[in-house]
Image: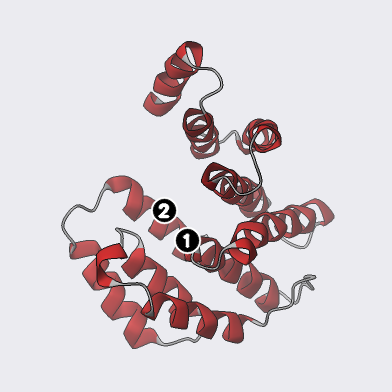
């Protein structure tokens, strides 16, 4: 709610600022307004060049919004739930396939695909969860130490869900939770990823 107030004020001062518009959508998603966020993100994406980093971020947030819509359905097999899942997958695929170094989009893609696979849902993606997990783990190993951000350990743990390597998951989550600089936002996001 506090972020919504802040980005509303910033939007009045600089209505076209892409980062602020993305944060506005993030705040909408996190306050239960995922559908409103989808509309804002679509408008934002339409104003940005395809290769702009904010475009990739906005597509990822679109995936996040549709993922939340899917999660909020009580009956995951319902047609609208399946459509939200497919839209989330499509949104995460675009930035990940455009730049595989944006591994967090791949991790979210894996989580959704694995969820659908376990539920017997068919998705139009060229990946199998274990193969995508292995691909992501290889990519993550190649990230130089200096470029391993606050999400890195969580991403390794999440990608390892696809290989069911429980020791790696536990080890990386322990390090992640104890790492200096961790914030409530990071932990909430990771907890949501594992529970929802």
- Mark number, residue 189: 2
Placement of 95 over or under 38, stated as above or below: below
Q: Secondary structure at mark 2?
A: helix
Q: Residue at x 49, y 66 (%)?
A: 101
- Residue lying furthest top in this view? 12
Image quadrant where one finds the N terminus: top left
Q: Residue at x 68, y 51 (%)?
A: 73
Where on the picture, by quarter, is residue 3?
top left
Placement of 82 over or under 9, stated as above or below: below
Give the camera-side residue of 134 and 52.
52
Give the camera-side residue of 101 and 83.
101
Where on the picture, by quarter, is residue 122?
bottom right
Q: Residue at x 26, y 48 (%)?
A: 183
Q: Position of residue 188 (x, y in %)?
A: 37, 51
Give the camera-side residue of 161 and 60.
60
Q: Position of residue 145 (x, y in %)?
A: 26, 71
Answer with left or right where residue 181 lies relative to residue 104.
left
Q: Residues within 10 Å of mark 1 (few under 14, many from 20)?
A: some
Q: Do callouts 2 and 1 mark residues in contact (Cβ within 8 Å)?
A: yes
Q: Residues within 10 Å of mark 2 (few under 14, many from 20)?
A: some
Where on the picture, by quarter, is residue 173?
bottom left
- Mark number, residue 193: 1
């Amino acid at each position: 709610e506090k972020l919504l107030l802040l980005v509303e004020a910033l939007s009045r001062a600089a209505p076209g600022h892409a980062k602020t518009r993305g944060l506005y959508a993030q705040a909408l998603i996190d306050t239960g307004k995922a559908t409103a966020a989808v509309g804002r993100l679509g408008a934002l994406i339409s104003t940005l060049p395809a290769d702009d980093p904010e475009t990739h971020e906005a597509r990822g947030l679109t995936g996040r919004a549709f993922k939340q819509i899917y999660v909020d359905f009580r009956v995951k097999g319902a047609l609208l739930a399946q459509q939200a899942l497919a839209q989330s997958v499509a949104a995460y695929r675009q930035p990940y396939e455009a730049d595989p170094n944006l591994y967090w989009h791949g991790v979210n893609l894996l989580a959704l695909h694995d969820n659908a696979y376990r539920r017997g849902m068919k998705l139009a993606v060229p990946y199998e969860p274990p193969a995508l997990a292995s691909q992501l783990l290889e990519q993550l190993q190649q990230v130089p130490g200096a470029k391993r951000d606050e999400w890195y350990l969580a991403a390794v743990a999440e990608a390892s869900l696809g290989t069911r390597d429980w020791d790696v998951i536990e080890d990386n989550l322990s390090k992640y939770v104890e790492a200096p600089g961790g914030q409530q936002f990071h932990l909430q996001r990771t907890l949501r990823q594992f529970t929802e």
